[in-house]
Amino acid sequence: MAGYTLKITEQPFKSGKNILASEHFQFIEGGATLDAVAIGAKTLEAGTAIARNTTTGKFEEYSETTPGTLEPGFDEFAILNVNVDVDGVNDVVVGEVIVRGSVYDAKIIGATDAFKEANKNIRYVKHI
């Protein structure tokens, strides 16, 4: 887990997956605060599509109420580059959040066509 809270814990090593299709990429400046209450208690895998809720200023998993339509009230569309454990109570700050670069499309979770259109700085490579 590459996230930070004020809660001190020790986590065992977990393997991950490489979603990067190039060595050229950019992480979000200053990190992204994940909204623990909105996400709930679960592990977000590397490759999960996230977006910032403009009301709370915190990031959530991206999902669409109407498939194919960009969800209103969200901006800063990005992709997690690490697995993150969220406990459902404590917000987590994550630094490895991709805002620009190339990723393997087949390894990305929740990035719809509308999501991809919202951040054209991320290129989705179809072949591995």
Image (spheres, helix red, strand yellow):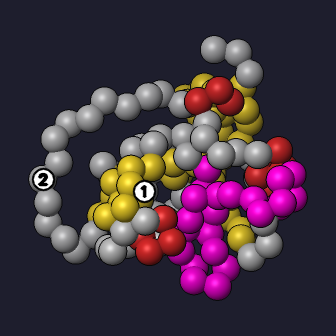
Q: Which residue is depicted at the point 77% across and 63% down?
A: 65
The amino acid marked with disc number 1 is: Gly
Query: Which residue is the extreme one toward the top?
Result: 128
103 vs 123, left or right, is left
Mark 1 highlights which residue? 95
Residue 46 visible in the snapshot: yes
Q: Which residue is depicted at the point 72% across and 25% down?
A: 125
How many numbered callouts?
A: 2
Separation (CA) of disc 2 from disc 1: 18 Å
92 vs 102, left or right, is left
**Which residue is nearer to you in this view: 29 or 68?**
68
Looking at the rendered image, the quarter that the C terminus falls into is top right
**Which residue is nearer to you in this view: 71 or 13?**
71
Q: Position of residue 30 (x, y in %)?
A: 46, 67
Residue 30 visible in the snapshot: no
46 vs 110, left or right, is left
Mark 2 highlights which residue? 10
- What is the span of residues highlighted in magenta in the rendered image? 49-70
Q: Which mark is residue 56?
A: none
Element at label 2: loop
The amino acid marked with disc number 2 is: Glu
Q: Position of residue 59 (x, y in %)?
A: 55, 67
Element at label 1: loop
- Asked if the magenta segment contains residue 48, the reply would be no
Foreground label between 2 and 1? 2
**Which residue is nearer to you in this view: 64 or 118?**
64
Residue 85 vertical position relative to residue 82 in the rendered view, above or below: below
Query: Which residue is the extreme one toward the bottom?
Result: 55
Res 7 → quadrant: bottom left
Q: Which residue is depicted at the point 70% across and 15% down?
A: 127
Compare marks 2 and 1 and give the one earlier in the sequence. 2
51 vs 72, left or right, is left
